[in-house]
Amino acid sequence: MIDRSYKDLLKMRRFPHTWCPGCGIGAVLKNVAMGLREMGWDYRNTVIVSGIGCSGRMGGYMNVDAVHTPHGRPLTAAEAIKTVRPDLNVVVLSGDGDLASIGGNHLLHTARRNPDITVFCNDNEIYGLTGGQAGPTTPKGTKTITSPRGEHYQPLRLNRILTTQAPYFYAKTTVYHLNHFKTCIHEALRYKGFSFVDIISDCIELNGRRLGFKTAHQMFKWFDQRFHIVEGVRDHLKDDELGIAMKEADTLPKVKVEVSEKPEVSLKDLKPFSLEELASFDGQDGKPIYIGYQGKVYDLSTSPLFQGEKRMRCHLGGKDLTQEIGIAPHGEELIFKFPIVGRLKE
Ligand SMILES: Cc1ncc(C[n+]2csc(CCOP(=O)(O)OP(=O)(O)O)c2C)c(N)n1
Ligand code: SF4
């Protein structure tokens, strides 16, 4: 018997939905709901965030708390929610125009910061809601309402952009390759970190028909010709490959720091200085510059702090500066590397 419990994740009272018959968004909604169900994610522990567009309407049909953000901003809201409520599962449902065009900057930087959120991008390679204009992922040469002679520019290659800097999880699939699609959803939901599933989908009405497809199924067959599945997890995916590209954080090479240990000097073996004696080592008339710090006397004559024009700082020489160095940023670092020449008398 078919398990229809995923419907608990949908607001069935709102159906029939708003999307055109044959639109791929329905398949995305249903399969994401099934994926959440398998994970045991529901209204008690999950929040959906979506942007603006036909795809952005998915959040309104999910039976969990959902945030409908301004155009291009779902990732900002999603990351904020995850930051203040790390106990919640945060899932973004939106379109390629919303996420990669007006929201492109947020996509780059959210991916870079790697928050634990999952993004399902209904990538119909067009701006659907507004009438079928060319968008960021529209393939070069595609005829759209804004490119009647064929789109002039190369599309953004999310497969390349989102796999440049580890860690990353980028999966590409289509609404037609159902088993693969389900696997990508499942793996993305399980991934700890920023996961992005790029789902090639159809906008039959405002893209497909203009391209000459009579039915959504004809578009699906076209997806089948354009893409093929590659097995296993890859570092990167080529433009025509469907699969999962994933990489853990690059570990920085361990830098060996050589520390030359100075032998610990016993205070009692050091030459004792009274404050009056110390005061005479103030750098004037060619005398060295001595400074007292925590009971020891340091020779700072060669310190860059007192060279050239900075010699005017010589009024600091010949004094016990324990308090001043204690509150100065990097104070101790400035003094420790210089030779110890004595100790302050009690
Ligand atoms: C600030 C702002 N600019 C432009 C729009 C108009 N607009 C609404 S949806 C949309 C494109 C959405 O495209 P996509 O994310 O691909 O979703 P689809 O409709 O294709 O599912 C645009 C440009 C808007 N609503 N707000
Ligand atoms: S306009 Fe396109 S993307 Fe929007 S619901 Fe219709 S088929 Fe789907």
Image: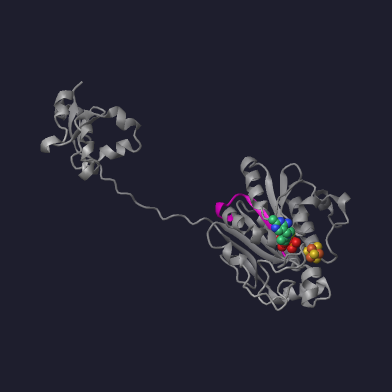
Q: Is residue 11 visible?
A: yes
Look at the image and tell me in which quarter the N terminus lies. bottom right
Residue 223 % position (x, y) = 73, 73
Ligand 2 is found in the corner quadrant, namely bottom right
Tell which of 184 and 56 is nearer to you.
56
Tell which of 91 and 17 is nearer to you.
17
Q: Is residue 94 visible?
A: no
Chain part drawn in magenta = 111-123
Tell which of 78 and 182 is nearer to you.
78
Asked if 288 appears above or below 167 in the picture, the reply is: above
How are the colours assigned in the image? one colour
Tell which of 53 and 250 is nearer to you.
53
Asked if 257 appears above or below 327 in the picture, the reply is: below
Residue 282 % position (x, y) = 17, 33
Q: Give the number of marks.
A: 0
Q: Residue at x 63, y 73 (%)?
A: 153
Asked if 253 appears above or below 241 in the picture, the reply is: above
Residue 258 % position (x, y) = 30, 49
> Which corner quadrant of the image does residue 302 belong to?
top left
Q: Is residue 8 left or right of residue 252?
A: right
Q: Residue at x 68, y 52 (%)?
A: 74
Q: Is residue 10 left or right of residue 106?
A: right
Q: Is residue 306 left or right of residue 218?
A: left
Q: Is residue 299 left or right of residue 98?
A: left
In the image, residue 196 lies in the stretch drawn in magenta: no
Look at the image and tell me in which quarter the C terminus lies. top left
In the image, residue 122 lies in the stretch drawn in magenta: yes
Q: Residue at x 21, y 32 (%)?
A: 315
Residue 243 % position (x, y) = 65, 66
Q: Residue at x 30, y 39 (%)?
A: 333
